[in-house]
Amino acid sequence: MKELNVEIEIQNADLKAAEERIRQYMNYAEYRNALGKKDANIAKETGINRSTFSDWKSGRSAPKGEKLKKIAYALGITVETLLGEEPKEEKQTWYTNDETAKIAQEVFENPKLRVLFDAARDSSPEDIQMAVDLLSRFKRTNPNG
């Protein structure tokens, strides 16, 4: 009888661990969806195998260490936020300049701005200048658009 109780306790612990992994995945998915992305996008951006995400979603396993850091970075959040270990309402900033923090938050919250920012990372200085000139001209000719 004692062995059966131990086995049940082990199964309960395994179930609780799987539920926690699924809860963490759901938290991750909320932030990922806010960026208009899928697991495949995050996998490609981070170099993490897509099976990691499906295993996480099912509760079989969860990413750890460097993988968590890469995923959090791709989402623009901390590992603690990714795991749901701090309140979502809490505004955390890494910037000493309020304007920079505001701009970073806007880029994080607006998927279209994020696309522009990501495109700029991969562009040459000349291509960035051409885009700036084009947008400046557009803004001058369409002040409300």
Image (tube, rainbow, N blue to C red):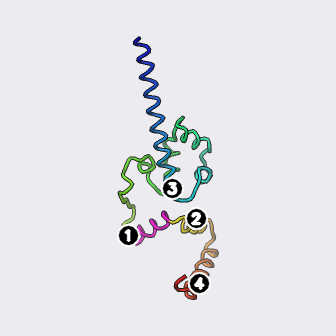
Q: Do the residues under discs 4 and 3 have CB atoms within 8 angstroms? A: no
- Dot 4 falls on a residue whose secondary structure is helix
- Give the residue at x 59% y 84%: 138
For disc 1, the marked residue is: 97
Disc 4, disc 1: CB below 8 Å? no
Query: What's the magenta region?
Result: 98-109
The residue to which callout 3 is attached is 75
**What residue sits 49% from the left and 40% below the top?**
22
Three-letter amino acid code of the residue under disc 4: Phe
> Residue shown at 39%/61% (left/top)?
94
Q: Earlier in the sequence, mark 4 or mark 3?
A: 3
Query: Are the residues at dot 2 and dot 4 in contact (C-beta closer than 8 Å)?
Result: no
Name the mark nearer the viewer: 3 or 1: 3
Q: Nearer the viewer, mark 3 or mark 2?
A: 3
Q: CA distance from mark 2 to mark 1?
A: 22 Å
Q: Disc 2 versus disc 4: distance between alpha carbons?
A: 21 Å
Q: Which mark is residue 62?
A: none
